[in-house]
Image: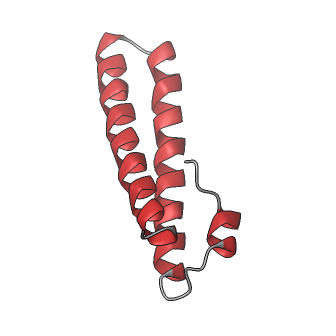
Amino acid sequence: MKTKFKDLLDSKTSHGFSIASEILRMGEKAERIAEQAKDAQKENGEHAKMFACNIQDWMGQIVEIAQSSLDRQIDPS
């Protein structure tokens, strides 16, 4: 995620701070799960690799949604 918690603190977002911080937390969690799935692809059999690849893709999509939401929350222009 390109947005960090400090970015939320520095932004002019006051009414949506709690929502923005939860979105950031969700995106960070998705990044960690995607990284674990990526690591699992290296270790396991072919079916596990396909499953882990799917998880990595899904988590990447969640990260993109979370980042897009934060971008709009921090800079609504």
Residue 51 in picture, x, y percent from top left:
30, 26
Residue 9 in picture, x, y percent from top left:
68, 74
Task: State which quarter of the image contains the C terminus.
Answer: bottom left
Indicate whether 73 appears above or below 62: below
Indicate whether 16 appears above or below 42: below
Indicate whether 15 appears above or below 29: below
Residue pictured at 39% horizontal, 62% vertical: 69
Name of the residue lying farthest toward the top? 46
Name of the residue lying farthest toward the bottom? 15
Indicate whether 18 appears above or below 69: below
Q: 11 or 49, which is in the foreground?
A: 11
Q: 72 or 3, which is in the foreground?
A: 72
Residue 8 in picture, x, y percent from top left:
62, 70
Quarter of image, res 60? top left
Quarter of image, res 73? bottom left
Q: How is the image coloured?
A: secondary structure
